Amino acid sequence: MSSAKLVAESGKILDVAAKDAPLTVRGLTVSYGNKPAVFSVDASIPAGSMTAIIGPNGAGKSTFLKGTLGVVPRLSGEVRIFGKLFEDARDRVAYVPQRASVDWDFPARVIDVVLMGLYGSVGLFRLWRARHRAQAMDCLKRVGMADFADRQIGQLSGGQQQRVFLARALAQNAEFYLLDEPFAGVDAATERAIVSVLKELKAEGRTVVCVHHDLSTVAEYFDRVLLINVRRIAEGPVDTTFTAENLQETYGGRLAATHIDELHLA
Amino acid sequence: MIDDLITALGAEFVQLSLTPIVIGTLAAIACALPGNFLLLRRQALIGDAISHVVLPGIVAAFLVTGTITAVPMMIGAGAAAIVAVIMIEIVKRLGRVEPGAAMGLVFTTLFAAGVLFLEITDTSSVHIDVQHALLGNLESLIWFDAEGWGSLLDPAALATLPPQLPRLAVVLVGITLFIFLFWKELKISTFDAAFAGAIGIRPRALGFALVVATAVAAVAAFDAVGSIIVIAMFVCPPASARLMTNQLARQVGWSVIFATISAVLGYVFAGYGPGWFGSPYAVSAAGMIATVSGVILILTCLFGPQRKRTGQHAEA
């Protein structure tokens, strides 16, 4: 079926179609102390797809993202981004960490944060220039935050902070977007704005992966899912993979049967 | 009054006060610059830790070499700083304690060990003691050969400047260059280390470089001004500066201004202040400089334009 399954079965060869896929992961294991947070996970994200990474709290979803990007050290496993090592494909990838992972009291304005996304195009020992500012403003417009460019970031609401993070990722002009819980604690208007930007990215042929919590919106927002609970439970198109059976396995007893019923799954 | 001022800034001033003021200012700025980033990374205590472990480092260097010349002292202090940073990491990981506790534990232990070291070592013939370690000897860094402002243009007189002055000037230039050249990287990795890692900045390597810059500043400043100023300057000017602005570059600028004001006013108050109240004795310049920086912090807490920023969060 999916290339990931093929990888999992053979453990060696990736099929040709997946070779230059935005993300191919084999046997990724990341551990904090003695306890593995992610254990031997395989995944294969096809180009132009929009994938939700789903699993209970503490299942290693964020760690999986960080492990693929080398933000946390990998214990074992192989990761290929567009068929290359991440270090060689860095400028094709944009990563949006969890909003709560940074200190929003940091002395910076909204525009300063978006400019960080243009780091790669500024050059060593040089500073941001007027053309970078213009680019950053364009990105702020796309997320509806242009009026806030000079606002201190500590004065933003949670939803506005998340939009600023998305604008910073847009500034990277990447082909592959990895977002860690972009909808956590945001208002409904922000959620709509973010979804519409992500769908634009997909329409432009870019690939999107989100760590996602809200099971009720999975089918509406995404076309693929990756179910993780330390190990990989299942991966594939929403229609065939986002099933009651797989969810039950992913969440164990933690997901009430009535909740699954409400999702109206196949 | 004007005559007083001319006398105050005359030849005697150049000989007795100019070099201590300049050295105090250089030391204050050299510590305040990296202090900005330590503060924002919630690592302000690391400056404290490093400046304390300088003492055992210096005593150890004296035990090994038997002299108190500058180079072995600075190597000893630098080595002690590195040992302390490694010990903090070990305590953090093995002891599973929070970073602040690990730092507090390591530097107090090492400083206490340094004091014991000092007591059981025969250092009576040389000038190292706890008092010196804490308060330095800023007042004694006078320029013997200066005969007035003209000496600033006299190569022979310049050659007799206290060696701490050129040493601190070099250190300050180095730290300024480091912060200027890696401005983007320091800013991004301080704000968002995970993002920095993903875009190819190496946050751990940069964090280590920052600690090295801190250690260099602490060791160079310690010799001239003692650890009280070093500790105060790592924290007070940056913390005051944060209350003045919401932009990092301006914060760094304000911290330099506050460090300079602390050093100059502190020295003047210590040397001349008691005289204004009829006392013939001067007080410790290092103590006064640290006190002035604390007073500036209190003033910015009360009147700084950005003092109310927390609590203004408009939650969604």
Image (cartoon, grey):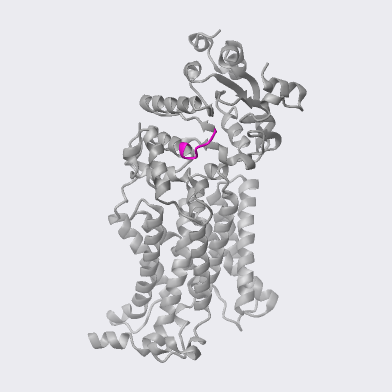
Percent from the top left, x then y, of residue B203? 57, 49
In the rendered view, does B70 fall on the left or right side of A152? right
Kindly identify the residue that appears in the image at 44 percent across and 73 percent down. B24
- Screen quadrant of the C terminus of chain B: top left
Kindly identify the residue that appears in the image at 60 percent across and 12 percent down. A240
- Screen quadrant of the N terminus of chain B: bottom left
The vertical placement of B99 against B263, above or below, is above
Percent from the top left, x then y, of residue A266? 56, 7
The vertical placement of B125 against B171, above or below, is below
Residue B241 lies within the magenta run:
no
Magenta span main SS: loop
Percent from the top left, x then y, of residue B104? 54, 55
In the rendered view, does B55 fall on the left or right side of B180? right
Residue A173 lies within the magenta run:
yes
The vertical placement of B233 against A214, above or below, is below
Can the viewer see residue A204?
Answer: yes
Kindly identify the residue that appears in the image at 37 percent across and 73 percent down. B264
Query: Start and end of the magenta stretch?
Result: A170-175
In the rendered view, does B8 fall on the left or right side of B185? left
The vertical placement of B114 against A113, above or below, is below
How many badges with numbers are in the image?
0
Kindly identify the residue that appears in the image at 62 percent across and 36 percent down. A67
The foreground one among B104 and B294 is B294
Percent from the top left, x then y, of residue B73? 61, 74
